[in-house]
Amino acid sequence: MSEERKEYKAQVVQFNDRAITYTVAGQEVRLTPQMVRQYLVTGNRDLVTDQEIVYFMNICRARSLNPFNKECYLIKYTQAESAAIIVSIEKLRMVARQSQDCVGWEKGIIVQKKDGELRYSKGLILDGEILLGGYFKAKPKGWETPFELEVNLKGYVKKTKDGNVTRFWNPDNQPTMIAKVAEAQGLRTVWPEKVQGLYIQEEVGSAEAIDVDFHHSEETKEIPVWCDEIQPTIDADPEKFERFVAATIQANRTTEADLRTAANADPEKFLTAYLAWAQKQAAEKRERKPRSDKGQPRKPQPAPDDSPMAGPPPPMDVPEPATGPQADPPAPERQPGEDEPSLLSDELLLDERRAELDELKRTHRYYVLEAMKRTGIAHPMTVDAYDELIRQVWLIVQEKK
């Protein structure tokens, strides 16, 4: 590895380990950029910039937010939009009430009656009336005139990619949703020192936005946690377990949410599949090691039967062991003084390349996306594919200088 790349990797590690510590309600909160990107981003974490992560961390500290209590999270879906810090409307209300000049506020909806006249409602829509938007009113202590704000419904109704209104913005929910949008905007305007930079889910995105229910996308479904029977296996070797999950998802063409649901429903079957896969991986890894001291190649180890969960095959980046009489040709005799065969297996090389590419995604995510387009390698499966993709990223970095 070149000195430039070593220095770059050291800088990435130093940034990801940078921590801030603060106290919320007597509880110590510790955040690092790595924690934020890994656990507190909804949407596409690869699109979130380092600056947006640092801003999120400092807003959490300044506003006394504990993201691990689900008080806030970071959301970003496209390059065109900036990342937004999402909180619940209840959190905005609680923070705003802490202002010394706060004596309350009013919010509701605006409807048009049959005769065309507008009516301000606390949420009730009568037969024949049309919902137009939401409103907010507040008069803090010392203000001579109240502050009033109105928002148009059409600008906030979200739709799925096929053009249908999302379930959270269906007509029955629209009065509640648009009232919360008006309230959140009003609170930020009147008490910016308390809630500036904080948004609620209902405000984020445009008509093309993906429907998000505070923590999870409607399209990706809420991802359940692993059940107690499976968690000890994860803790034993998290990286190996993650590779197994990725292989299973690819083999069954499913989602992680559906996989976890099925695994939690029958953990014994799932763990049996994992054990069979792990044994097969270990056997293949032994086959890739150098020959024994006697100079004879290792005999192929029998691979376990496919697992009962559609048998997730080993990931494509690990080749299937060869069989037959020509599977293991004798290795050439090593000459005196010749270097010992490398003990670094393909799997370890792949792990190294994965880590390097992950770092590039965190710091040069746009260049990585461009490199994927150039090479046509969206999901590298071999060391050579990783090397080519990484090489292209660094070429693009040089081009942009």
Image (cartoon, rainbow, N blue to C red):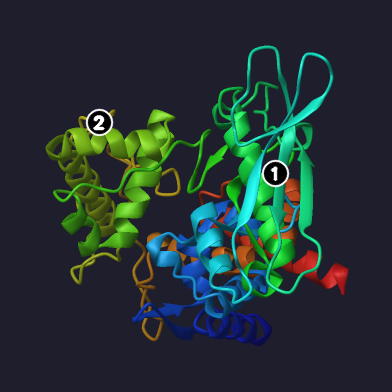
Secondary structure under tag 2 reads loop
Label 1 crowd (10 A; few <14 / some 14-19 / many >=20): few
Label 2 crowd (10 A; few <14 / some 14-19 / many >=20): some
Q: Residue at x 61, y 68 (%)?
A: 102
- Closer-to-camera residue (346/228): 228
Left or right placement of residue 285 versus residue 156 in this view: left
**Disc on the earlier residue, 1 or 2:** 2
The answer to whether residue 120 is above or below residue 20 is above
Percent x, y of residue 295 = 23, 66
Left or right placement of residue 129 versus residue 314 in this view: right
Looking at the rendered structure, the kind of residue marked 2 is Met
Left or right placement of residue 65 versus residue 297 in this view: right
* Quarter-of-image position of residue 63: bottom right
Percent x, y of residue 317 = 45, 49
The answer to whether residue 86 is above or below residue 217 is below
Residue 332 visible within the image: yes
- Closer-to-camera residue (20/326): 20
Q: Nearer the viewer, mark 1 or mark 2?
A: 2
**Which quadrant does the C terminus fall into?**
bottom right
Q: Which residue is mark 2?
A: 309
Q: Which residue is mark 1?
A: 376
Residue 377 visible within the image: no
Q: Residue at x 73, y 55 (%)?
A: 371
Disc 1 and disc 2: Cα gap in Å?
31 Å
Percent x, y of residue 30 = 42, 80
* Quarter-of-image position of residue 142: bottom right
- Closer-to-camera residue (310/381): 310
* Quarter-of-image position of residue 151: top right
**Which quadrant does the N terminus fall into?**
bottom right
